[in-house]
């Protein structure tokens, strides 16, 4: 839930929510949701984009249909001399790494990785362990995903 900061009004929140649900909505469709005419919606959306509330637009792909059957979360334990910018830069170069989260706790980072198979995951883990600054990893394989929000709650 977002605390009201005075920067976003109720119409802005409704637009952000509607855009998250369907980024391909026309300004007329968005206008019917929030009760504004398309030019006013256009101005508000452009203002929200310009202020950084909307970082971009993308399609949500089905990983399984694309052959990426295996999802794993990998905890990365780094060495004391690890240069985090170089380390995360190396992780960003690996296409199987979908997310990198710096975390509090024993590990330094948690990664979300998508691969075609356990053999592919094994290859990715070998490449991860070769990254300068990596001490060790711990892998958790996802069996199923009963719920995935796919957006941010703006209320």
Image (tube, grey):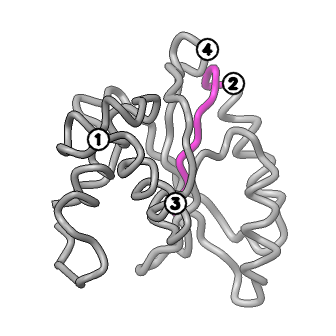
In the image, is residue 56 above or below residue 50?
above
42 displayed left or right of 137: left
Query: How many other residues sit within 10 Å of disc 3, few (<14), some (14-19) or many (≥20)?
Result: few
Q: CA distance from mark 3 to mark 2?
A: 41 Å
**Residue 100 sits inside the magenta stretch:** no
* Local secondary structure at mark 2: helix
Name the residue tied to disc 3: 49
Sequence-wise first label, 3 or 1: 1
Mark carried by residue 119: 2
Instruction: Name the image quarter holding the C terminus.
Output: bottom left
* C-alpha separation, residue under disc 3 versus residue under disc 4: 30 Å
- Name the residue at the bottom extreme: 81
Chief secondary structure of the magenta span?
strand
Q: Which residue is nearer to you in this view: 36 or 30?
A: 36
Side (left or right) of 87 relative to 35: right
- Nearer mark to the viewer, of 3 and 2: 3
Numbered mark located on residue 66 in the image? 4
Asked if marks 4 and 1 touch (Cβ < 8 Å), the reply is no
Name the N-terminal-most of marks 3 and 2. 3
What residue appears at the point 75 percent right and 82 percent down from the top-left corner?
82
Extent of the magenta region: 110-119
What label does residue 88 carry, if any? none
Q: Nearer the viewer, mark 2 or mark 1?
A: 1
C-alpha gap between disc 2 and disc 1: 40 Å
> What's the distance in space between the residues labelled 2 and 4, CA to CA?
17 Å
Residue underneath mark 1: 18
Distance between mark 3 and mark 1 Cα atoms: 14 Å
How packed is label 1: few (under 14 Cα within 10 Å), some, or many (20 or more)? some
The secondary element bearing badge 4 is classed as loop
Q: Is residue 94 left or right of residue 135?
A: right
């Amino acid at each position: 839930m977002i605390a009201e900061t005075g920067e976003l009004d109720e119409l802005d929140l409704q637009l952000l929510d509607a855009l998250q649900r369907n980024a391909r909505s026309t300004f007329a469709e968005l206008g019917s949701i929030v009760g504004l005419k398309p030019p006013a919606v256009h101005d508000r959306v452009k203002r929200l984009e310009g202020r950084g509330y909307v970082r971009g637009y993308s399609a949500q792909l089905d990983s399984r249909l694309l052959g990426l059957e295996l999802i794993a979360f990998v905890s990365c334990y780094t060495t004391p001399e690890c240069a985090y910018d170089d380390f995360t830069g190396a992780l960003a170069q690996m296409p199987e790494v979908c997310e990198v989260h710096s975390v509090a706790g024993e590990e330094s980072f948690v990664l979300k990785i998508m691969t075609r198979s356990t053999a592919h995951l094994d290859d990715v883990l070998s490449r991860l362990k070769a990254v300068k600054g990596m001490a060790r990893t711990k892998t958790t394989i996802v069996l199923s995903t009963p719920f995935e929000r796919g957006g941010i709650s703006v209320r």
